[in-house]
Amino acid sequence: MTEFGAVRVHDAVLRHVEESLRSGAIKIGDRLPGERALAEQFGISRASVRNAIRSLEVMGVVRSSTGSGPNSGTVVVSNPSHALGGALRMHVASQQLPLKDIVEARIMTETWALEHAAAVSWTPEQLDDARLLLEAMDDEGLPSEIFTLLDAQFHVALSALAGNVVVSTMMESMREAIRDYISEAAARQGAWEEVVHVLRAHHHGIFDAVEARDGVVAARLVREHIDWFYGQAR
Ligand SMILES: [Zn+2]
């Protein structure tokens, strides 16, 4: 098969899945037909089907597992930040997306999210995820790599209160894009003990402002927090 033909076959499978999702013919949690059935349906090789499935997996649309258990096969999932985060990270690595620009975009997104979080309605229970993460980060014995993971989740949990799924996805993606940079920066910090002390205080301030529904203060504190860490890490 020519390369052109392979691309078209691959696109046809992706288009079919997209249309089936849009029409509701397949939904999150559904299983896609097996490789053999799809190959017959499209009149293509099983290798082409595998390539198409692999693309969907990279996009965070399906999860495949081999074997014959109840969890095997190709299941439709929703993991929108997976593809976006992975792609952004690659372009940060190739230095085509400057770190400084990602940091600025993250500040823009997150200050918007916290301002809105203060303005829209949510129940006290919806703050619990962020609160649990905040408390977990107070553990003095936490290794820096665990702290930075919880830190990322904390920011996502607070921003989620704004109720905008696209903004939450963008935030997760941007954080994913600079994941390695943040853990390297944390590991490089000779005085991690002092840094983590400041980060903890920042997080408590941000959390309290959101809980008090003071969007202006929450936005200012989160901006200062991100700026401060970026300044330390450089
Ligand atoms: Zn933080």
Image (cartoon, helix red, strand yellow):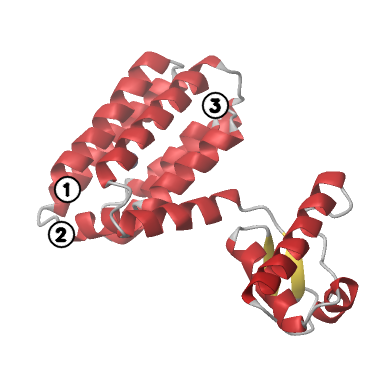
The residue wearing badge 3 is 162
Q: Residue 134 or 169: which is nearer the viewer?
A: 169
> What crowding class fits label 3: few (fewer than 14 Cα within 10 Å), some (14-19), or many (20 or more)?
many
Residue at 85%, 55% in the rendered image: 26
The quadrant holding residue 33 is bottom right
Quarter of the image for residue 2 reads bottom right
46 relative position to 121: left or right: right
Q: Is residue 104 above or below residue 152?
A: above
Q: Residue at x 47, y 52 (%)?
A: 85
Residue 173: mark: none
Residue shown at 89%/72% (left/top)? 41
Q: Earlier in the sequence, mark 1 or mark 3?
A: 3
* Depth order, front residue of 57/116: 57
Determine which of the numbered discs, if any, sits on residue 233 in the image. Answer: 1
Which residue is at 54% across, 26% downward?
162
Work out whether 137 lies above or below 123.
Answer: below
From mark 1 to mark 2, how far is it between C-alphas? 8 Å
Does dot 3 land on a helix, a strand or a loop?
loop
Residue 90 image point, x, y percent: 39, 59
The front one of 192 and 220 is: 220
Give the mark nearest the N terminus, 3 or 2.
3
Work out whether residue 22 or residue 7 is closer to the camera in this orientation and state it: 7
Q: Which element carries disc 2, helix, strand or loop? A: helix
Q: Residue 188: which disc?
A: 2
Amino acid type, residue under disc 3 in the picture: Ala
- What amino acid type is highlighted by mark number 2? Arg
Total marks drawn? 3
Query: Quick one: which residue is furthest to the left in this view?
Result: 190
Q: Is the C-beta separation of discs 3 and 2 under 8 Å?
A: no
**Would you say the residues marked 1 and 2 are in contact, meaning their CB atoms lie under 8 Å apart?**
yes
Q: CA distance from mark 3 to mark 2?
A: 34 Å
Q: Position of residue 188 (x, y in %)?
A: 15, 59
